[in-house]
Amino acid sequence: MNETQRETLNLELLIRAGYGLIYVLSPEEPRILEAAAQIGRRLGWKVYEWSCLSGLGPRAGPPDPATLAPAAALQAAAKHREAALFIFKDLHPYLNREHQNVIRALREAAQNLPGRQQAVIMTGPVLDLPPELEKDVAVSDFPLPGEEEIGALLDDTAGHPAAGPDRPGDLSGPAREEIIKAARGLTLVEARRAFAKVLVRDGRLGAGQIREILSEKRQIIRKSGLLEYYEPDLGLEDVGGLDNLKQWLAKRKLAFSDQAAAFGLPAPRGVLLLGVQGCGKSVCAKAIARLWNVPLLRLDLGRIFEARLGGSEGNIRRAISMAEAVAPCLLWIDEIDKTFGGQNAESHDGGTAQRVLGAFLTWMAEKKSPVFVAATANNVSSLPAELLRKGRFDEIFFVDIPNEEERRHILAIHLGRRGRNPADHDLAALGQAMEGFNGAEIEQAVIAGLFSAFDDHARALTDWDLTLAAAETVPLSKTMREEVEALRRWCHGRARPASESSRMKAAARLAAKPGAAGR
Ligand SMILES: Nc1ncnc2c1ncn2[C@@H]1O[C@H](COP(=O)(O)OP(=O)(O)OP(=O)(O)O)[C@@H](O)[C@H]1O
Ligand SMILES: [Mg+2]
């Protein structure tokens, strides 16, 4: 069964369960109309369609021009007595206070239709329900097409006679699979356009066109304005310290593989990194994509609330559905507290942030697709409790100010990244001089030291340059001591430390000593 067939069945279940008003969120109208027609045939119900250009009419018959206005169309639908589905195309521009009569007509329909074997199905690419209708409307996400459907489209396109006499599709070996994978996340129409474009340009569709299709997809996803493809610039080897977190991630390196599933392992859901500013949360979150070798998608929560992109709730569903279609992938949500934190959540009116959070949490709890969520936050006190509840993230890590050993490591990384040999420096002494520094401050001290050396006839960097730079820095852990302390207290017991504590390290060393076994 492919995605469309499965979702058609779901829709049929909703109808048979007596939902009178159903909103199908999808940009792909033809797929939904086809699904509705199938359901109509199966149930023996008549199918009517409405659009603002033609009015309401039977699927194959003439529409009634007196029903161009949506409220009039809904009232006309209410007069029908036979079992029927009424498909309303693009009703979303009318679902607001300016069209109170449409909202009212829908509410009345919600009360009357189910008893009569009738349902109104609204379709549109965005979803922004007014509060009056929230309880009455069942929302169905028509997911993007799956591999089977894209595969059928690909075979159709590559083998199409119009594509040339000698059928330019070279879909032997792994090329077919890879092209299909590259096109996942696109609607059928978009995939068809992408295939056609490369076919026209290159005259063929094969392994050589995979990159092109991937780049088409990147553009389309970027245009959605909700998700962004990111190239992970750094790996976990560029992050100093945080050994617990690194081990945890390394253990799950093959988590999305078939072997892991066969072994009985569930796909991991996500990780939440809480902690002090500038300690490597964002860098780590991005680096997971490199470690696991999956695409990195950034979800910009701020954009979810941008009205020009459509309703916020529809936006989050759309973003999730795109990520699911690209899966396995890493969905990076940076600074989740900025959107879902207490005061912020209330600042979006009408509880919109609450609804978006609700949709996100439901998805997190129920999700089966291999989308791994890596979220970061530093203002923990305002995070909603639901987000921290078990079953959402697999693990919550607390990222603290680096300890002395970690500072040495971070220092070595940043010296190395700027072409200096860490062995030329007294890392132990410098690590001590940078007591209380976070990773970002250590990096800044290295850069400031390099500026001093450069300014002095571009001579070699000395420990003195670095010590002076460190002395001129007042670390955040000092200026914001109370906040950092409060954060530590809050995280204690609630989150797992991302760094191995010195006590644990000592125990590990002891256990590794000869003769330690069996003690
Ligand atoms: N553990 C670390 N190892 C190496 N570099 C680090 C480390 N922590 C921070 N840095 C450096 O500091 C910069 C800022 O780190 P990052 O953006 O990951 O911090 P953050 O924890 O996400 O902070 P914020 O809470 O302010 O978003 C990074 O670009 C990186 O170069
Ligand atoms: Mg960050």
Image: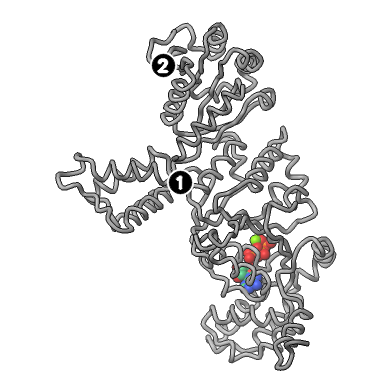
* Residue type pointed to by label 1: Gly
Q: Is residue 55 left or right of residue 414?
A: left
Provide the residue designation for mark 1: 185
Quarter of image, res 500? bottom right
- Kindly indicate the quadrant of the structure image that contains residue 438: bottom right
Q: Can residue 502 be seen in this view?
A: yes
Location of the C terminus by quadrant is: bottom right
- The kind of residue tagged 2 is Arg
Choose between 450 and 339: the one closer to the eye: 339
Is the residue under label 1 in contact with that under label 2 (CB below 8 Å)?
A: no
Q: Where is residue 69 in the image (x, y as percent from the top left)?
A: 52, 12
- Residue 2 vs residue 403: left or right? left
In this view, the residue in front, 205 or 83, is: 83
Q: Quadrant of the N terminus?
A: top left
Q: How crowded is mark 2: few (under 14 residues within 10 Å), some or many (20 or more)?
A: some
Q: In this view, does 289 lie above or below 25?
A: below
Decide if ligand 2 comes within 8 Å of the CB at mark 1.
no
Label at residue 59: 2
Q: Where is residue 2 in the image (x, y as percent from the top left)?
A: 44, 40
The secondary element bearing badge 2 is classed as loop
Please tell me how crowded label 1 is: few (under 14), some (14-19), or many (20+) other residues with Cα within 10 Å: many
Reading the chain from its start, which is encountered first: label 2 or label 1?
A: 2
Q: Which residue is drawn at 51% across and 29% down?
A: 124
What is the x, y in percent for residue 135? 69, 26
Closest to the camera, between mark 2 and mark 1, is 2
What percent of the width, then of the height, locates residue 416? 55, 81
The answer, for residue 193, to whether it is visible in the render is: no
* Left or right: 118, with 210 as reference point: right
Residue at 61% in and 82% down: 412
Q: Which of 165 and 474 is in front in this view?
A: 165
Image height of 403 relative to 509, above or below: above
- Name of the residue lying farthest toward the bottom: 514
